[in-house]
Amino acid sequence: MSRHQNDAQPLTSNTNDNNHRFKEKPPVLDTDADAQSSGISLPQVAQVDGVDESSTTKTQLQTLWHWKPKAARYDPANPPKFTIWMNMLFGFASCFTVSNLYYNQAVLNKIAETFHVTFERASSVATLMQAGYCSGLLFICPLGDIFPRRPFILGLIAFTATLWIPLCLTTSFPSFSAISFLCGATTVTPQLMLPLVGDLAPPARRASSLAVIVSGLSLGVLLARTLAGVLANFTSWRNIYWFGLGVQWLVFALLYIWMPDYPSKNPDTRFNYFKMPWQIAQLLATEPLLLQAALVAFLHSGIFTSYWTTLSFLLSSPPYEYSQVVIGLFGLIGVVVIVCAPIYSRLIIDRLVPLVSAIMGLVVETLGVVVGTSVGSFNVAGPVVQAIMIDLGGQFTQIAMRSSIYGIQPLKRNRVNTAYMVVSFAGQLTGTAVGNRLYAQGGWVYSGACGIAFGGFALVVCLVRGPREQGWIGWSGGWKFRRDDLPPKKSETPTEEALEEAGAVGGYEDDGQRGDDLENVSNARNGNDDRKKEQ
């Protein structure tokens, strides 16, 4: 008791019990100081117990929110390394958060039965979820350039997971629809992970690191539709929503424990939220590389969605007349291609300039559409080959284009990513609308011809501007396909571009040779202390 009384000396002699309560909290926040500065005297606390209890609970929640495990604490002198484990964790988080957008697509008929609405009205749930996602891309993702990423991402996941509970329970279709829109708007964690990986991954490994996240996104889409279809076939469709709730909290727990508390990229920036859309439009108007990549993404997305939205019409009609289960299994064709994306990204995309990899992907993708369109009307091998080649070429194109745009204005990577994704999303909507319209007019061949045209136009967009061109059109800088910022051999020193990029990012896992190379270059450049500190 005497020890407790000594500890309580900073407060009045009548506050022993309450001070003891404050002392029990973890010492991450200065809760004793908070108690002294609260302005609540002991008689008031003693008379109104609810005030003290509420204040204590609030402080405990703040303490818990700001507390970080040792693995997640950021030390500027020794920033956390970007490891394979962390890369896979971010990919896992992306996979099971993007799934939120696609669970409903496989159970729309069950939703219609449960809420006693038409199938057309039930399908509006999927539309609202996608519309919410588009809103989140435009109005939430750019904030990643301003806010610290850890609390921002954790807050979005926790908010979405909490809001998900009514989706599991509500019996009101209007409520279900409105909450679906809100959940779609806050399910943008993958689009915050991609710029973060762009910040942390070394330039020579950026493509393969991004491939892990892109693969997670693609797997999330496939797994969501497959799991939802299986669970709805054997149990209640609500169970896929309960599954989504549980996995979201699992993602939250894993990131809470392991995600480092990276500082804000622009802590001193005056940010006008209402000027944000204009800033994104300015990036598209002033950055030739971003506009080129966004146009390619628009056309690739059009090919992808046009194929998948018209495929079900083809396979359910003569001569195939497949069941919904068989049609759903077509979505699993590209799983191997998706899972192997980090491997061929490391072996090929990381070694070449991104534009060359994008052109390779578009050629494969367009050839796949040609094959599928030519024989798909009478031989199922056509759509199968097309699915494989679209997935393979699409992975090459997406990863290469994303790798290239994350070299643009490192302090604005989230806004750069938003510009890219908004244009890409518009391509998805265009491909769906145009593909369905053309299929209604001329069947599989007409919709396939649209995909071929999209692929050809995307190749033209790539070819009018070279990989080292600084302007809008041209091939100045040479035709060399190998990247200039690859890790140097032992007898070489890093390029200026690689050094500048590494200095801007920092905090990733180093190669053994990299540290020696940077030290040699620093000494050779008259002891550039600033760069040495950054490295």
Image (cartoon, rainbow, N blue to C red):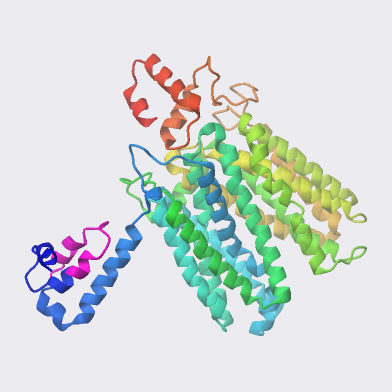
Height in image: 48 above or below 439? below
Furthest residue to the left?
Answer: 13
Q: Is residue 242 visible?
A: yes
Which residue occupies 60% across, 46% down? 212
The quarter of the displayed image where residue 479 is located: top right
Quarter of the image with the N terminus in it = bottom left
The quarter of the displayed image where residue 257 is located: bottom left
Asked if the magenta segment contains residue 46, the reply would be no
- Toward the viewer: 370 or 484? 484
- Toward the viewer: 236 or 460? 236
Boundaries of the magenta span = 20-39
Q: Is residue 276 visible?
A: no
- Toward the viewer: 336 or 285? 336
Residue 189 percent across, percent down from the top left: 51, 56
Residue 508 percent across, percent down from the top left: 46, 37
Which residue occupies 75% across, 56% down? 332
* Number of numbered discs visible in the structure rendering: 0
Height in image: 227 above or below 145? below
Residue 480 percent across, percent down from the top left: 64, 22
Asked if the magenta segment contains residue 38, the reply would be yes
Residue 525 percent across, percent down from the top left: 38, 16
Which residue occupies 58% across, 28% down? 469
Which residue occupies 18% across, 82% down? 48
- Toward the viewer: 322 or 135? 322
The quarter of the displayed image where residue 431 is located: bottom right
In the rendered structure, the answer to whether residue 500 lies left or right of residue 293 reads: left
Quarter of the image with the C terminus in it = top left
